[in-house]
Amino acid sequence: MLHCSKLFRRLFHALPSVPSSGPQPWLFIGLGNPGEKYQSTRHNVGFDMISTFAQALGISMNSVHFKSHFGEGEFEGTPVLLAKPQTYMNLSGESTGPLAAYYKLPLNRVLVIYDDMDLPCGVLRIQPRGGHGHHNGLKNVIYHFRGNREFCRLRVGIGRPPGQMDPKAFMLQKFNKTARVRIDAALEEGVEILKMLLTKGLTECVNSANAEQKYKHLRVQNLPC
């Protein structure tokens, strides 16, 4: 009985703590598919964005929390929680919903990062709310938020498939060299957008970041990805 009690205490204390005071955390969640097979594919740019941001802030993603690879840190005094659900894309809400509930976060402190074929390759767009845009991962997140769509999104453009190519096959392919350069640059831009969100707030971040990305959209919209 004593052994079980000690084991329970170790497991309990291993859980990340819920902040009891100070600034409310942001929860950033990148969508993707787990496993080496899907690494660096178009559909996994949400994972890539979280990894790039974690590296920039020196946040370890080695723990597992509610079916996600998870890390926590802060930037200029604002706590930030990072998650990459390991449920496979179409079940992302099974991790996202419990994480937001555990930390008692309103949905306007949750940001979901995902790939978007409606944006040119490497173009970013941050939004305070919206629909699912036929993205199955986002659709499942909304389902586990009980239909509530009032959470933030960072859309990462991957462009449209060429010709008559199946969109599903396109999403699961790796980027070619040219597109990879553009995506890597977008990930670095995304780090700065997320930092701005943490320091300046959502409204200023949306206005500033989207204005800058609008001009990028015009420059690259006709380039192949």
Image (tube, helix red, strand yellow):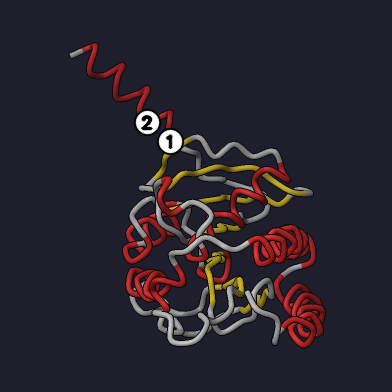
Q: Residue at x 48, y 65 (%)?
A: 43
Label 2 environment density (alpha carbons within 10 Å; few <14, some 14–19, many ≥20): few
**Quarter of the image where one finds residue 91:** bottom left
Residue 118 placed where, x, y %? 56, 84
Please tell me how many numbered marks the rendered image carries. 2
Q: Tell me, for residue 15, which label it has, or none.
A: 1
- Residue type for callout 2: Phe
**Quarter of the image where one finds residue 15:** top left
Q: Residue at x 47, y 57 (%)?
A: 104
Left or right side of 98 for 157:
right
- Residue type for callout 1: Leu
Residue 88 placed where, x, y %? 35, 57
**Quarter of the image where one finds residue 27:** bottom right
Mark 1, secondary structure of its residue: loop
Q: Please name whichever residue, 197 or 192, is drawn nearer the observer in this view of the structure.
A: 192
Residue 163 placed where, x, y %? 49, 87
Q: Is residue 22 above or below residue 176?
A: above
Q: Is residue 3 above or below residue 189?
A: above
Q: Is residue 105 above or below residue 208?
A: above
Left or right side of 165 for 181:
right
Alpha carbons under labels 2 and 1: distance apart: 6 Å
Mark 2, secondary structure of its residue: helix
Q: Quadrant of the N terminus?
A: top left
Q: Are marks 2 and 1 in contact (CB under 8 Å)?
A: yes
Residue that badge 2 annotates:
12
Q: Residue at x 51, y 45 (%)?
A: 18
